[in-house]
Image (cartoon, grey):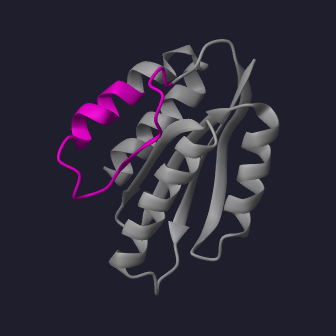
Amino acid sequence: MRFAICYVSTATKDLPQSEVVKILEETQIRNNKHGVNGLLIYSDGNFFEVIEGAEIKIKDLFKIIREDTRHKNIIMIFEKEVDKPFFEAKDANFISEDTQHRQMDVENFLYYIKDLDEGTQKTVKNILKAIG
């Protein structure tokens, strides 16, 4: 059984764009190395991430994420076991304002949340609209 956590957070005010790029790249490398699938979006000073994988790995990773001082106001959207992966692809991915295929990835993500309850789907869609 796979486990997924989805959250949003706000970058600290003094976080330069170069550090955001570093976060996005490090996250992609770390997640792929540890078998964590997901999507990290950064837009207008906000992060939106979904991580999925083995439950222990995901919960341990989320503890690290919560302790990272480069962001604040972390709000968990959902934390749950998933019958089938949201992200069929092997690799984790990220989206930022500079990513060329951003809209396609967001639309693909919306497909993956279709198995969530209606209220959670609506919340996720509203967050994606706000940060997109």
Give me the residue at 75% from left, 17% from top.
Answer: 1
Residue 5: give x, y in percent of width and height. Answer: 66, 39
Name, please, the residue furthest toward the right. 56
Instruction: Locate residue 103 relative to residue 20 in the image: left or right.
Output: left
Residue 92: give x, y in percent of width and height. Answer: 47, 39
Instruction: Locate residue 1 relative to residue 26 in the image: left or right.
Output: right
In the image, residue 61 above or below residue 114 = below
Name, please, the residue furthest toward the left. 100
Give me the residue at 37% from left, 67% from top.
Answer: 21
Residue 56: give x, y in percent of width and height. Answer: 82, 38
Residue 34 within the segment the image draws in magenta: no
Instruction: Locate residue 87 relative to residue 83 in the image: left or right.
Output: left
Instruction: Locate residue 118 relative to residue 107 in the image: left or right.
Output: right
Q: Which residues are magenta?
A: 87-109
Numbered-mark total:
0
Q: Nearer the viewer, residue 28 or 132?
A: 28
Give me the residue at 52% from left, 67% from top.
Answer: 10
Asked where in the image residue 75 lies, by quadrant, the reply is bottom right
Residue 68: give x, y in percent of width and height. Answer: 66, 70
In the image, residue 66 above or below residue 118 = below
Name, please, the residue furthest toward the front. 33
